[in-house]
Image: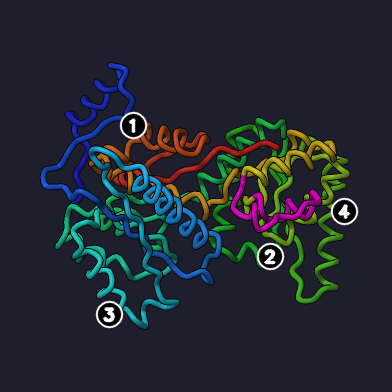
Amino acid sequence: MKKKLTVLTMAVIMLLTSSGCSVLTQETVKKNRPKDFKVVVITDDKSANKERYTSIKTTIKKYKDDLKEQEEKETGTPERKKYVQELVLPADITKDMPSVEAKIKKLAKDKRVQAFVVSTEQVGLLPVIEKVKKERPEITTIAAPMQENANYLSEAMDVVLSMGQNERAEAMVQTAKKMGATRFIHYAKRDDLKDKNIQLRKDAIKEFCKKSGLGFAEVALSDYTDEAGKEKMKQILTENIDSQIKKFGKDINVFGASPDLDEVILEKDKQSKYIVAEQSTPDPSKTYPEVMGFKISKKHKDDYMYMSDRISEGAKRYGLSNRLAGYQKPYDVFLPAFAIDLAVEMADRDLTQEDITQKDYLEAFVEKNYGVSSEFKNYSEAMYNYQVFTIEHMVY
């Protein structure tokens, strides 16, 4: 059963804020807490989601490097040591659930383990997490994300983090409007709209355009099964963009629902100069490098600020400065790293569920640790521990 926010809790937060004390500096010390602690990350293997897997590996390495540096410099009273390790799930947990459950329970027996971060698209782990919580109720559990029923997630996990299609649509429309768009053109193949998430996002974009006073048009493109069909679809897309510009001018925002539309839209934009607030996959390592004419070396494969700088250089070269935008980091890279850092912060400073499910706390944490603005809100009024979020767009 989740602890509900009380009047007392809110009063304490208001007191800390009014007295000039940042919400990020709150700390309580539990009795008999372990000297050192571990955070365990449960996730899928590289083949399931390369970006997420690499992000987790990179974050774990960061803590290993910090630990090594701390041990080398340690003098006087040592700091608490922070260990982060992963448990990689099999490709299909339903075929090996007893083994998965045994591994998780074994990890939970280690009293140094203070948090589980679960980041997987597979379903079926929540009953295992519930068993762990019965044995070790002090362990913090964070979903980042998990593809389970929202109500069940909120009940079973301490903190649930997710970027919803509705929130992404709203942020996209707001960014397009700030960039000067007067109309939003949504392109999608018929096959694209069979995807429930794409359909929901499209409907949400339409609704937010209406609320924001932006014109909205959706254009259906033909599906294809071979290269000739693909080339025909590209031609139709290009011709339709020309017709939209002829009707409404260059201050239109053009959005494609799937990656195969992104390249066409961005290549065409180098000549036509319309607005692209976001790609179908808002990742600076996707499509932008090819279109802007640069390669990502092994040295820079995880350096998203470097990629953004190169995209900005390309935008300037093609006369597209302030006409292109996207996320500084892709969702699958940002979310697991954020969840791990949050779990470490909770364990290190003995923060409670109520502490870190406050909108102000989470937004301040993101600003402090990643240098970007964000917006968090409850999934629903009753689910204060289920937080959906967006991070600010970077305009190139």
Coordinates of residue 42 in the picture (x, y in percent) = 37, 64
Disc 4 target residue = 239
Which one is closest to the eye, mark 4 or mark 3? 3
Q: Earlier in the sequence, mark 3 or mark 2?
A: 3
Q: Earlier in the sequence, mark 4 or mark 1?
A: 1
Q: For the residue labelled by badge 1, is the local secondary structure a helix, a strand or a loop?
A: helix
Specify the label residue 98 is tagged with: 3
Instruction: Measure the alpha-carbon separation of dots 3 and 2.
Output: 41 Å
| Quadrant (top left, top right, bottom left, bottom right) of the C terminus | top right
392 up-or-down from 97: above or below = above
Colour scheme of this structure image? rainbow
Question: Neighbour class for label 3 at 10 Å: few (<14), some, many (≥20)?
Answer: few
Of all residues shown, which one is farthest toward the bottom? Answer: 95
Left or right: where 249 falls relative to 95:
right
Question: Neighbour class for label 4 at 10 Å: few (<14), some, many (≥20)?
Answer: few
Instruction: Measure the alpha-carbon separation of dots 4 and 1.
Output: 52 Å
Coordinates of residue 282 in the picture (x, y in percent) = 62, 50
Left or right: where 313 falls relative to 281:
right
The range drawn in magenta is 284-304
Instruction: Measure the alpha-carbon separation of dots 1 and 2.
Output: 47 Å
Left or right: where 143 falls relative to 247:
left
Which one is closest to the eye, mark 1 or mark 2? 1
Identify residue type, mark 1. Leu
Q: For the residue labelled by badge 4, is the local secondary structure a helix, a strand or a loop?
A: helix
Disc 2 target residue = 190
Disc 1 target residue = 24
Q: Earlier in the sequence, mark 2 or mark 4?
A: 2
Instruction: Measure the alpha-carbon separation of dots 2 and 4.
Output: 18 Å
Identify residue type, mark 2. Arg
Q: Earlier in the sequence, mark 1 or mark 2?
A: 1
Instruction: Measure the alpha-carbon separation of dots 4 and 3.
Output: 56 Å
